[in-house]
């Protein structure tokens, strides 16, 4: 069946397919149309010929040609396959029973089960698995019992050991691809193992069936974690790692979200049984809906450097919206994550997970810890941190409780606090820029300048992009994801002679960032594309946007510096004051 999908995709172009339903117009490197899935006057529905996908920046609809036909015709996948096969003149062999989804699912479960046993056999019994076994037992301190309980394994560092093994069991190549354990070769014919040189963690469903895998590289290759993509049995936005083991405990004790698979396993082998994590995705509504069948209590676990907080803010908000009682557990310094804490002080780790604090107390405590509440500037900074958070509290009793507490902590009048929080309610928070919503407010050039710059860099002539990239640093980006993408782009473009191949570039990333890059690439630059001036305008736009980003970044640094200078003045730290002032002068000159 995978073969048929590929054949159809080779014969049809998504632009033509979509154009037969709604009229599409060329816009720069992409095409755009008025979205057929929501009401709009100005087009925000983009189609990429290079990536063969579409994305609506208004309603979020996105996918490939099969998704499009399913959505617009209101049919399921097999029917969309028939429609497009017909159009492409590709015959669907009836014997394959493509419409018998259960048959297919059964086969995938078999393949996944055999693969799991194969990986574990290599890990525990083969010389090839020695390094992986050492890594798990010695470095991660995962016990042999846990390895067996979680069915961990090792995918050998060879092209097709698993593929050959599964063929010998009578499975066809197309079944291996469909289940996600093998992939087509990039060049040439044939298929290869998807997971190579990786410690493999099976994704186990609540019925103990194997849905897919994630593999952690043993050889410092990218991506660090590789996941099974969407298959007929695995849907990552619904999957919670560990739920098969923890769901009964979760019913009694609530759920604890941790960072990754090894944190779940560490907790589990130390007797904490209500722990789960998401894999290769941010927390989704689907996952929360599933969790709500078991509990209304969620604890999010954070590292002591608070690095994850901003990223998790959206998750906290989503959980709050669904009426979960959200609490926070913080890993104390100097431990960098839960796994490390469990390895060094399991008793303390357990205690921390069992006694989380309510989310708003947590925000209040961290703001107080990071700033000096005795000074005016400190008070201002604390309010700036907390207004966007507390103004979102919908329950009036809870709202008043924290408003009063905040007023008393900072020793300012309740009226001031209330009016600031009320104001915060009406103006949407800028403190936590979230990428999810960048589509809805398309084009948002001003607020989302970082993403827009990447978008332009991907589409501009390579020499121009190189020139601009030299002027920007990854530190100029506030958004961590974008900063990371920028860094890789910098590296990718360094020795390139021809324009960026967006498909090859996105392949360097895991699903989530891949999607983000595709989105950015399809972000319309709104240039006049009717006449042939497009490349020229694009370059000009790129220059302006880069300059604006650079200046924004400098202004932010200056603002921080001037606050430090004020503090140094008050504290009479002469040397520090001189150093900061010099830095300030030098930096402000670069703004001119
Ligand atoms: Zn739409």
Image (spheres, rainbow, N blue to C red):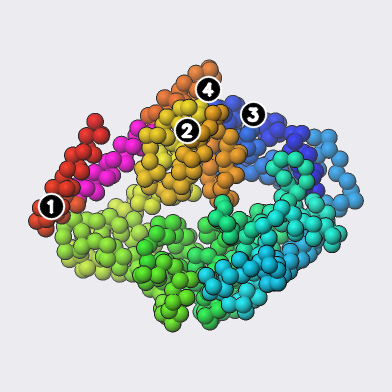
Q: Which residue is mark 2?
A: 456
Instruction: Tell me the quadrant of the picture where the C terminus can be found.
Output: top left
- The residue that label 4 is drawn on is 529
Cα distance, mark 1 to mark 2? 43 Å
- Which quadrant would residue 590 be assigned to in this image? top left
User: Closer to us: mark 4 or mark 2?
Assistant: 2
| Mark pair 4, 1: CA separation | 56 Å
**Residue contact at pointers 4 and 1, CB within 8 angstroms:** no
Q: Nearer the viewer, mark 4 or mark 1?
A: 1
Look at the image and give the residue range highlighted in magenta.
546-563
Between 99 and 266, the one nearer to me in the picture: 266
Numbered mark located on residue 575 in the image:
1
First along the sequence among labels 1 and 3: 3
Q: Is residue 478 left or right of residue 118?
A: left
Name the mark on residue 188. Answer: none
The mark that comes first in sequence, 4 or 1, is 4
Left or right placement of residue 517 versus residue 214 in this view:
left
- Using the numbered discs, state the Cα–Cα distance from disc 4 to disc 2 in whole angstroms: 15 Å
Asked where in the image residue 421 lies, by quadrant, the reply is bottom left
Select label 3 or label 2 by which is in front.
2
Q: Is residue 274 left or right of residue 70?
A: left
Image position, residue 540 (x, y; %): 42, 25
**Pointer 3: what residue?**
23
Give residue 7's position: percent from left, percent from top: 78, 39
Q: Nearer the viewer, mark 1 or mark 2?
A: 1
Residue 312 horizontal/vertical position (percent): 44, 59
């Amino acid at each position: 069946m995978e073969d048929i999908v590929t054949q159809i995709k080779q014969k049809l172009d998504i632009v033509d397919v979509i154009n037969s339903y709604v009229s599409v117009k060329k816009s720069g490197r992409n095409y755009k149309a008025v979205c057929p899935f929501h009401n709009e006057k100005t087009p925000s529905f983009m189609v990429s010929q290079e990536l063969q996908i579409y994305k609506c920046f208004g309603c979020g609809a996105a996918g490939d040609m099969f998704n499009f036909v399913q959505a617009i015709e209101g049919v399921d996948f097999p029917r969309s396959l028939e429609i497009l096969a017909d159009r492409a003149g590709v015959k669907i062999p009836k014997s394959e029973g493509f419409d018998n989804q259960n048959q297919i699912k059964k086969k995938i479960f078999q393949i996944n089960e055999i693969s799991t046993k194969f990986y574990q056999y290599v890990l525990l019994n083969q010389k090839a698995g020695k390094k992986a076994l050492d890594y798990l037992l010695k470095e991660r301190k995962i016990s042999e019992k846990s390895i067996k309980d979680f069915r961990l394994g090792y995918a050998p560092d060879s092209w097709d050991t698993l593929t050959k093994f599964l063929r010998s069991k009578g499975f066809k190549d197309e079944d291996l691809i469909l289940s996600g354990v093998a992939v087509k070769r990039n060049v040439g014919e044939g298929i290869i193992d998807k997971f190579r040189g990786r410690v493999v963690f099976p994704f186990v469903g609540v019925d103990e069936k194997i849905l897919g895998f994630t593999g952690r590289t043993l050889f410092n290759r990218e991506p660090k974690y590789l996941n099974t993509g969407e298959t007929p049995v695995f849907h990552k936005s619904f999957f919670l790692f560990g739920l098969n083991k923890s769901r009964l405990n979760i019913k009694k004790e609530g759920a604890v979200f941790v960072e990754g698979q090894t944190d779940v396993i560490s907790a589990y082998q130390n007797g904490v049984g209500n722990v789960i994590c998401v894999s290769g995705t941010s927390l989704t509504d689907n996952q929360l809906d599933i969790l709500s069948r078991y509990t209304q209590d969620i604890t999010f676990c954070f590292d002591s450097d608070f690095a994850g907080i901003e990223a998790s803010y959206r998750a906290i908000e989503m959980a709050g919206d669904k009426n979960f009682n959200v609490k926070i557990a913080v890993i104390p310094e100097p431990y960098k994550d839960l796994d490390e804490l469990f390895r060094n002080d399991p008793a303390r780790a357990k205690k921390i997970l069992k006694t989380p604090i309510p989310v708003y107390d947590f925000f209040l405590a961290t703001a107080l810890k990071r700033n000096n509440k005795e000074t005016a500037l400190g008070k201002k900074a604390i309010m700036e941190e907390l207004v966007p958070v507390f103004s979102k509290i919908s329950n009036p009793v809870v709202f008043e409780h924290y408003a009063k507490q905040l007023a008393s902590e900072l020793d300012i009048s309740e009226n001031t606090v209330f009016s600031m929080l009320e104001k915060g309610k009406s103006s949407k928070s800028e403190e936590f820029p979230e990428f999810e919503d960048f589509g809805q407010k398309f084009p948002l050039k001003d607020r989302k300048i970082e993403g827009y710059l990447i978008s332009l860099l991907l589409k501009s002539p390579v020499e121009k992009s190189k020139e601009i990239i030299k002027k920007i640093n990854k530190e100029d980006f506030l958004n961590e994801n974008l900063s990371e993408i920028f860094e890789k782009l910098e590296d990718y473009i360094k020795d390139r002679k021809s324009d960026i191949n967006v498909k090859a570039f996105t392949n360097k990333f895991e699903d989530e960032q891949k999607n983000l890059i595709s989105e950015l690439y399809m972000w319309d630059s709104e240039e006049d594309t009717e006449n042939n001036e497009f490349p020229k305008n694009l370059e000009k736009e790129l220059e302006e946007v880069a300059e604006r980003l650079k200046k924004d970044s400098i202004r932010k640094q200056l603002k921080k510096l001037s606050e430090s200078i004020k503090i140094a003045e008050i504290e009479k730290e002469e040397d520090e004051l001189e150093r900061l002032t010099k830095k300030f002068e030098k930096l402000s000159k670069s703004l001119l």
